Image: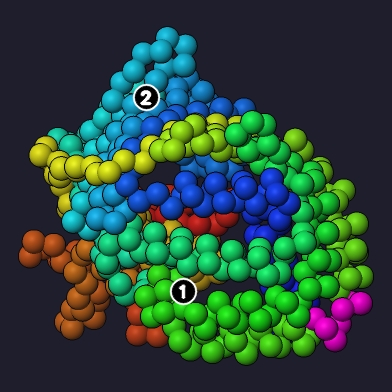
Amino acid sequence: MHSKKWLALLLVLMLAMGTLTGCSPTEKEYYNLTMEASNQKVYEDSGSIDLSLVQLPDSMFEGEKSLTKEVLIKAMNQHRIDYWGKANLNQGIFQYEFTIVDNATGEKSAFSSLVYKDDVFYIKVDDIISYMKKFGDPVSNQILDQFYGDVQYVSVTNQDLEAMMPPGSQNGSTGNILQKSSQQQLVMQRLFGGLLDNVYDKYESNLISKSNNKYTFTLRGADSIEIMKPIAVYTIKNIDKLGPVLKAFLNSLSQDDFASLSLTSDMKDEALTGIDMMILVVNQNRDMYMAEIEKMATAAQKDLVKTVNDSEIVSSIEKRNPQTYDMTSKMRFHITAGTPIEELDFTLNIKQTMKAVDSIQVASPTGKVTTFKDLEKRMPKQMEVRVDYGMYSYNQGFSGTAGSINVRLENNQAYLPLRLIAESMGDKVGWDETSQQAYVERNGQRTIMTGMIVDNQTLVKSRDFESLGYKISWNAKNRTVTIEK
């Protein structure tokens, strides 16, 4: 592997450690309290989520007709979300209730509830739809009614969630998600605990302050380089300590630990070999890496300040009594980037109070429940084709595929493969031997589709798909054909 790639891998680790904490007394107290709170298994939880939007990139709303930037900003700034919940991670159950609160009047209205029990998520959607319709136009509201109708809850299984993941990311396991997440958290705590105790024990981040029993973490975006630079230098100087700790961590993992991290034994062997190589390469190129870090820090600082502006993250944690933890988080993002330059400006405030309890009870919903698969069947099927690149993406609801597609451009017309598109839309395609033409069959009725034959495929003008009732649109800016049924 090229030496700069090893530097990139080191930087990922440095970022995690640099923003986690250091090892001053205050920083270790903060880390231990954070771990104590996150390791609670049975608890009640309440708080609020308040998003203040100032500016959103126009590119986010390309192609949108009803959800405009102004509508979204108004909706978000007018309201906040209050929530109350309870969870038992040992049993793999939880229940959360969400309420919309008008920031001006204090008026409250039900927004949703989320239940997880017996490896099934239940999401209450009827109140969400009612809220969305307050800001929609008649056409978009009619579409919402068409898709959701009298549905109260949507049930989503672990298998449904895995089917939504990108190809190759599924681990083939559909056990309790909460228990897996809890185990994964414990595994990562072992890793970071080992690093703090044995590698970064002399490092101090100066990101944590303490007032009485309250600990506050502050990270300004403009200071990121100044934070990363010292930990990068520290890591390189202590690379001989880092390697053994990483290897000991990997060798300590059980089969269940590997499964929780979606890793295999082959990956472990590759990682162990890679760690030895990393130590060797860093030691052989120590001076070069030091110079590279200095160069990167100098070059990045000016651009970083222009990009992140006054962005910052401020979070706090306080143990109010032996069972209760108060936590806050303020995330201010003010980003100017892109070509042409666009601006993202918002502040997210989260308040949370968590109380450890002995036990909880969670009941499955009794209202009208529709499965995720049944709901998805109501969703429109849509395919986008980038005609200059021969690439397509297809989605229905939350499921989708993507790949290459045979496209021919003739006389300013895009010819697209009939079978791939029609069968993706759920239609049956056949070949008439007598007329030597392709057809689409519905309810015993055939629609002949004329076009050109290329590589034993029938390619049809994109607009000719309208004869099948598909909606066809053309985006001249990015030269994309959109087909919807």
Q: Quadrant of the N terminus?
A: bottom right
Q: How many marks?
A: 2
Mark pair 1, 2: CA separation? 44 Å
* Image coordinates for residue 318, horizontal then vertical, percent: 55, 35
Residue behind mark 1: 404
Q: Is residue 10 left or right of residue 160?
A: right
Q: Residues within 10 Å of mark 2 (few under 14, many from 20)?
A: many
Instruction: Pick whichever of labels 1 and 2 is earlier in the sequence.
Output: 2
Q: Is residue 130 above or below residue 389?
A: above
Residue behind mark 2: 100
Q: Residue furthest left?
A: 444
Q: Which residues are magenta?
A: 282-288
Q: Which color scheme is applied? A: rainbow
Label 2 secondary element: strand
Amino acid type at image mark 2: Ile
Q: Residue furthest front?
A: 322
Q: Of residues 317 and 384, which is closer to you in this image?
A: 317
